[in-house]
Image (tube, helix red, strand yellow):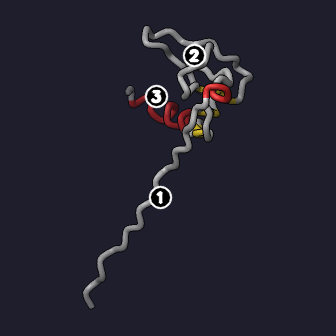
Amino acid sequence: MCPRFASLQEAQMSQVTIKVRDNGPFLVEGPVTVIDAAGNAFAIPANKPAIALCRCGQSKNKPFCDGTHKECGFQGTERAPAPLSITPPPTAS
C-alpha cells in the first residue's frame, strides 16, 4: 500500500461495517467496491447505503442476495467470540 494514500484508505475503511444477519446475507454498510475474480467491479448505485452479499449460495444475482435464503432453508447464526479478559500479573510490593 502506498503510504501516501494509507490514511485515506483507513478513513474509508473505518466507514464500512459488515453485519452477519441471522439465516441471511452479509449486510455491508458504507462505501465499498465489489470486485470479481477477473478484477471487474460490480455496478453498485452510488446512493445505495448498503448492499447484501449472499451467504446461502442459491442467489440468482450472485454475489448479491436476492432473498432465496428464505426459501432454501439456509441456517447461519454465527456469533463473534466473547472478548478475552486479560488480567495483569500481580505487582510485587
Of the image marks 2 and 3, the number of the one nearer the N terminus: 3
- Number of numbered markers: 3
Residue under pointer 2: 62
Relative vertical location of residue 46 with respect to residue 3 in this rendering, above or below? above
Q: Which mark is residue 82?
A: 1
Front residue of this view, candidates 80 and 4:
80
Front residue of this view, candidates 61 and 90:
61
Q: What is the x, y in percent for residue 85?
A: 41, 67
Q: Residues within 10 Å of mark 3 (few under 14, many from 20)?
A: few
Residue at 30%, 82% in the rendered image = 90
Q: What's the residue type where badge 3 is placed?
A: Phe
Residue at 61%, 31% in the rendered image = 73
Furthest toward the left, the residue is 92
* Mark 2 and mark 1 residues within 8 Å of each other at the beta carbon: no
Q: What is the x, y in percent for residue 41?
A: 54, 12
Q: Is residue 53 left or right of residue 3?
A: right
Q: Is residue 84 left or right of residue 42?
A: left
Q: CA distance from mark 3 to mark 1?
A: 34 Å
Front residue of this view, candidates 15 and 64:
64
Q: In the rendered view of the protein, which quadrant contains the N terminus?
A: top left
Q: What is the x, y in percent for residue 57?
A: 53, 22
* Mark 2 and mark 3 residues within 8 Å of each other at the beta carbon: no
Residue under pointer 3: 5
Q: What is the x, y in percent for residue 61?
A: 62, 14
The quarter of the picture where residue 2 lies is: top left
Q: In the rendered view of the protein, which quadrant contains the C terminus?
A: bottom left
Q: What's the residue type where badge 1 is placed?
A: Ala
Q: What's the residue type where badge 2 is placed?
A: Lys
Nearer to us of marks 2 and 3 is 2
Query: Does dot 1 land on a helix, a strand or a loop?
Result: loop
Query: Does dot 2 land on a helix, a strand or a loop?
Result: loop
Query: Does dot 3 land on a helix, a strand or a loop?
Result: helix
